[in-house]
Amino acid sequence: MGQPSLPLHDCPPAPQPLPPPAQVGAVATGGCQVRCAGCKMVLTVLPGLTEFVCPTCQLPQMLPPELMRSTQAQAQAQQQRSAPAHGIDPTKIQLPCVNCKAILNVPHGLSRFNCPQCLISLAVDLSKIGQVLPSVRPPLPPEEVNEVAIEVEREEDEGGLAGETFMDYRPSKLSIGPPHPDPIVETSSLSAVQPPEPTYNLKIKDDLESSKALSCLQIETLVYASQRHLQHLPNGARAGFFLGDGAGVGKGRTIAGLIWENWQHGRRKALWISVGSDLKFDARRDLDDVGATCIEVHALNKLPYSKLDSKSVGVKEGVVFLTYSSLIASSEKGRSRLHQLVQWCGQFDGLIVFDECHKAKNLVPEAGGQPTKTGEAVLDIQARLPQARVIYCSATGASEPRNMGYMVRLGLWGAGTSFADFREFLGASGNLLFGMYVCRTLSYKGAEFEDVEVPLETT
């Protein structure tokens, strides 16, 4: 492939990577790196700046004299070649992918990444940025300090990647709600994709702003999931949403917020499917936390197989909580839980939450295997309730594309898409989750560990 004329280009040769955080004061593209005198976080200071404020601990500080001369000498040359940060987030550059032409939000200092839209490997060519972006920008205030990529080395798991790059996360197009109580990051590849414009107005917005029960990023999920549920796929089924946040981000409370939002719109029935019956108490707690104390939670395993809305059972509305084991269960007389749920839902456009949805991942097994009953049941209930508002919720649901066979409501394959069926989608290994997927995780910034050797005694 010839040398393209845009600032993002296919790799071969790798640009010089950023120095590791331990190399304090090393000069990198876009400035020099220093360690904050207060919180010890590694910061990238823009060329020409000698005084700045740490964005984490707000401590005003000044560059050491030996670095002042270096950065001042670089300032003029850097102004000619550095790219302006457009949009809401000043720590990122908007650049087009040379392959699919998608506009990507590229964090400053990130030299290489995969395009989240077409998955092509890209590298930032600073010498060509001026060809697509204006070369002059107003000077940034001293408080503007570039974000720093956090290199997290983690053990490889099922389909995981070791050494993935993470960026500090904050909602880029919404400013509702308090900050999340813990630092949150997302992968640099997801960070490079601009989310769609939020157009959905939450009915519970005022309640959430006064109670502060949900953080800004949890409210962001409510908006994008509700917005996604207003769309329909080419086959007529309602579009679904994939909540892929990691452990500790608060998926349960986010689900409760979605149930409460739908309740306010008159959708008084919801199915919450999870991995254990005891999690029903967590669901009750999460609903109470968001103010939905009036919504009852019914444990399906405590109910008979007769009609749920009959006089004898009396479940007219609320949340029916069940496990994946219950979903495939049937009575001695042949009555199935799945049929019972479909009958209760009727003309249903409420929520179906597949919590820990990776339990259905073996719908499309490897060669020689058979699909599991759980995967088939998850697929079946979606087919029987085409207007249901589906939420897939799992931190590991997309670790391998092969495990996504039950996620039919994402609209990644089938009529009106680029892939005729799921197997064709698998062959392309696409991950085109624009506007239908969020995946944030807790940051390990500030975490410490110690290797302890324990001698083993023989007896």
Image (tube, rainbow, N blue to C red):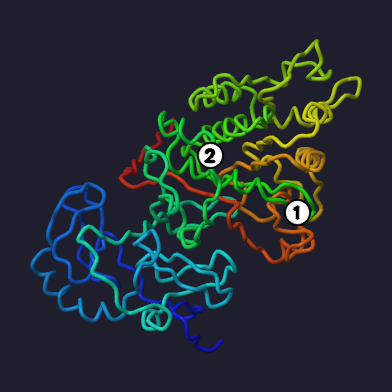
Looking at the rendered structure, the kind of residue marked 1 is Glu
Instruction: From this view, report whether residue 255 is shown above or below residue 160.
Output: above
Is label 1 in a helix, a strand or a loop? loop
Is label 2 in a helix, a strand or a loop? loop
Q: Residues within 10 Å of mark 1 (few under 14, many from 20)?
A: few
Q: Position of residue 388 (x, y in %)?
A: 72, 39
User: In the figure, residue 336 lies in which quadrant?
Assistant: top right
Q: Of residues 159 and 146, which is closer to you in this image?
A: 146
Q: Position of residue 390 (x, y in %)?
A: 68, 41
Looking at the rendered structure, the kind of residue marked 2 is Leu
Q: Which numbered disc covers residue 68?
A: none
Name which of mark 2 and mark 1 comes first in the sequence.
Answer: 2
- Distance from disc 2 to disc 1, alpha carbons, whole Å, reads 42 Å
Q: Position of residue 287 (x, y in %)?
A: 54, 25
Q: Of residues 105 and 173, which is closer to you in this image?
A: 173
Instruction: From this view, report whether residue 219 is shown above or below residue 312.
Output: below
User: In the figure, residue 136 lies in which quadrant?
Assistant: bottom left
Q: Residue furthest left?
A: 65
On-image quarter of the C terminus: top left
Q: Viewed as shown, does residue 227 lie left or right of 110?
A: right
Q: Position of residue 132 (x, y in %)?
A: 43, 80
Q: Residues within 10 Å of mark 2 (few under 14, many from 20)?
A: some
Q: Viewed as shown, does residue 194 lie left or right of 278?
A: left
* Residue shown at 76% from the left, 34% from the top: 348
> Which residue does the numbered mark 2 point to in the structure image?
202
On-image quarter of the N terminus: bottom right
Q: Viewed as shown, does residue 172 lie left or right of 262?
A: left
Q: Which numbered disc covers residue 366?
A: 1
Q: Of residues 455 and 325, which is closer to you in this image?
A: 325
